[in-house]
Image (spheres, rainbow, N blue to C red):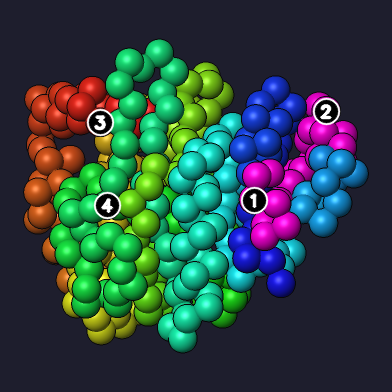
Amino acid sequence: MKLLSFAVPCYNSEAYMRHCIDSLLPGGDEVEILIVDDGSTDGTAEIADEYEKKYPGICRAIHQKNGGHGEAVNTGIRNASGMYFKVVDSDDWVDGDAYKRVLETLSEIVKGDTVLDLMVCNFVYEKQGAKHKKVMTYRFALPSNEMVTWDGVRHFHKGQYLLMHSVIYRTSLLRECGLELPKHTFYVDNIFVFEPLPYVRTIYYLNVNFYRYFIGRDDQSVNEKVMIGRVDQQIRVNKLMIDYMAGRNIPNRKLRKYMLSYLDIMMTISSVMLIRANTEEALAKKAALWEYLKDKNLMLYLKIRHGLLGRAVNLPGRSGRKITVGGYKLAHWFVGFN
């Protein structure tokens, strides 16, 4: 059995996928790299086949009809033979030195008696043209180099939450929890991180800047104009997360608090994008989203709606919306998240 499986979802990725895959190859025989060609129409399929031929037993090309990013991740999970599983998008890459530390740490952990469910590492916003790279670290939220349960987790501050870039899950846990991401939908990485959390018993934070998250392509899903254009998909993901949270009893207080905070962030992002769209239709969708939360679970609604972010994105009138957008722009400048 492999130690770590990487899924690399690729759709028309010929211009940059080599850089991504090459960064993963130093893992050698301890890893497998599942290159999932999601119905590409350029040279992606040929490049995937080339890597499988050149690196048999390490690289595997999987070709499928176009199902979107989520279905490519689903395919990766179904085909993974590694004990642990990580998604690396085809325009991103990993840091070589941090990669060695990840493999060394996982190797030591699997020799022990305690099963690790989730490894967390830092990621770096590789924003094109930025002089200073923003690093998302978790050193104040999680103790470093130590296996902990949720009770050992400290405080995640607002804006600091686990993303697909920062997590490595135990593969069998992803299967046990029945994770199935929706097809033809963007922003499902939020579901990938969110839904398995109640099944996680043990967490290990390795304080290395492992994942390099590229931001800069005009067609990228996190580009603000693209997000506004795809806001209905953002709403769909948001509603799926509401459904999941509303219908689940989460007894651990710290886990429940974290998941509530994550849902709070998602409601904020959806609301801001709808405000930024600046149409009557978008504002009606925003009102409908908050009503959806209220109908699903009144207690969840009250906690989020009357929290700091819930109040900030629901300021009344045009002037209130201007204040909300101003706050968003300030956060955008400070964090540099897209």
Which one is earlier in the sequence, the residue at label 1 or at label 3? 1
Residue density around tag 2, few if under 14, some if 14–19, many if 20 or more, within 10 Å: few
Q: Are marks 4 and 1 in contact (CB under 8 Å)?
A: no
Q: Which residue is mark 2?
A: 43
In-image side of 254 versus 75 (left or right): left
Residue 57 shown in magenta:
no
Q: CA distance from mark 4 to mark 1?
A: 24 Å
In the rendered image, residue 304, in percent from the top left (x then y), is placed at 17, 58
- State the extent of the magenta-drawn residues as a range: 25-50
Q: Is residue 76 above or below residue 47?
A: below
- Quadrant of the snapshot with the C terminus: top left
Q: Residue type at mark 2?
A: Gly
Q: CA distance from mark 2 to mark 1?
A: 25 Å
Residue pictured at 22% horizontal, 68% vertical: 153
Which one is earlier in the sequence, the residue at label 2 or at label 3? 2
Q: Are marks 2 and 4 in contact (CB under 8 Å)?
A: no
In the rendered image, residue 17, in percent from the top left (x then y), is placed at 68, 32
Residue pictured at 74% horizontal, 27% vertical: 14
Q: Residue type at mark 3?
A: Val
Q: Which residue is mark 4?
A: 138
